[in-house]
Amino acid sequence: HTPMSDNARSSPARVLATLGWITIVIAGMRAADTILVPMLLALFLAFTCAPLVLWLEQKRMPAMLAVVIVVLLVILVGLGIGTVAGTSVRQFTIEMPKYQQQLRDEMTALLAWLQDVGVKVSSEDLLKYIDPGAAMRLGASMVSGLGEILTNSFLILLTVMFILFEASTFRRKVLAIWGDRQQSMESFSKFADDVYHYLAIKTAVSLGTGVLVAVWVALLGVDFPLLWGLLAFLLNYVPNLGSIIAAAPAVLLAMLQFGPGRALILALGYVVVNVVAGNILEPRLLGKRLGLSTLTVFLSLVFWGWVLGPIGMILSIPLTMVLKIALERNEDTRWIAVLLGSGSELRTRPAEAPASEKSEQVAASTSG
C-alpha cells in the first residue's frame, strides 16, 4: 500500500468527478440559456468595444464620456441590425412557402430526368429524407434568433455599459489583488490583449465580408441582399463551415430566380470574398497562432448550438477561441490549446526551437 497506488486508485474517481461537474455545468447552461445568451452577447460586445473606449481615454477624454459615446454607437448599430433583421426575416418568412414549393418542383424535375436516363430513384423517399429548403430555414432561423435576442437590448446595453465602466480600472484591481506577482499580472494582461485583438480584427473582417456579400448579391439582382449580407457577417465568425451555411440559401434563391448560371456566378463571388477574408486577411492580421482546427470548429458549432441555440452557433468560435487563449496561458493546460489549434504554427516552428530556448534559459539562469 503506497502513495502511488492511492493516486492510481483516486485518478479514475477524480476523472469521474470532473466529468460530473462538467455535465452539471452544461445542464445548467442549457437551463439558463434565456439569461446566459444575453450576458454572453454583452460580454462579446464589451470586449469588442473596450479597445475603442481605452483609445478615447488615452486621447484625454473622460471615461464617462468615452463609454457614453461607444454605447451610443452600439445602439445605432443595434438599431440598424434589428431593422434589417426584422424587416428582411419577416418578408422572407412570408415568401418561404413559395420558395420551398419551387425547390420541390426543381427536385422533382431533376428526379424525373434521372429516371429518364436510367437512374431509378424514388422521389417520395428522397424528398422525405432530403429537404431542399432546410438551408433557407437555417439561415433565417439564425437571423431571427438574433432579432429575438435584440428584444433584450436594454439588459444587454446596461451590462455592456457597466463592463466598459470597469474596463479602465479592472487591471488596477487585479494588480492590487495579486500585489507583486508580476508574472501573473503579465499573463492576465497578455490574455486580455489577445482576446481584444482577436475580437476586434475578427469583427472588422466579418463586417467587410458582410458588406461585400450584400453588394454582390444586390448587383446580381437576388432578393433580400441585406439579409444575406447580415448572415455573411454573422457566420464569418465560424471559419470554413460558416461561409458554406451563409452562401447556401442565397445561392438556392438565385437559382430559383434566375437559373443555375447566375447562381454559379453568385457562388463564385462568395468563394472569392471568403478566400480573401479567411485565407489572406485573417491569417496576416491575427497570426497563425489564433487558429482552430476544422474538427474543433465543427464540434464547437454543434456543441454551442445545442447548448445556446442559433446564437450559440454564431458565438461558438469566439467562445472556443477565448477558451483556447486562456488555456495557452497555463503550462499545465497548453497541450489542450495545441490540440484545439489548427497546427499551422507547429509547421512553421523550427524543430530545434525548444532545445535552443531551453539552452538560452539555462544560460540566463547561470549568468544570473
Image: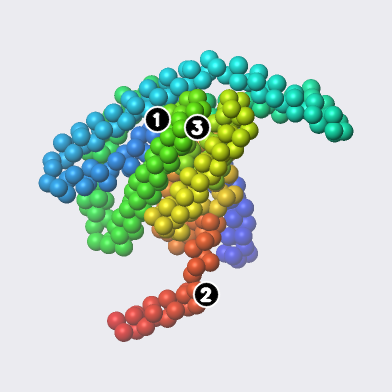
Element assignment for label 2:
loop
Q: Residue at x 37, y 83 (%)?
A: 363
Question: On the rendered structure, is 39 left or right of 345?
Answer: left
| Position in image of residue 51 (x %, y %) | 27, 46
Element assignment for label 1:
helix
Looking at the rendered image, the quarter that the N terminus falls into is: bottom right
Element assignment for label 3:
loop
| Position in image of residue 183 (x %, y %) | 31, 63
Q: CA distance from mark 2 to mark 3?
A: 50 Å
Q: Nearer the viewer, residue 20 or 282?
A: 282
* Residue at which label 1 appears: 38
| Position in image of residue 141 (x %, y %) | 52, 26
Mark 3 touches mark 1? (CB < 8 Å): no
* Residue at which label 2 appears: 351
Tell me the amino acid under the disc marked 1.
Pro
* Residue at which label 3 appears: 220
In the image, residue 287 above or below residue 71 = below
Q: CA distance from mark 3 to mark 1?
A: 36 Å
Q: CA distance from mark 2 to mark 1?
A: 45 Å
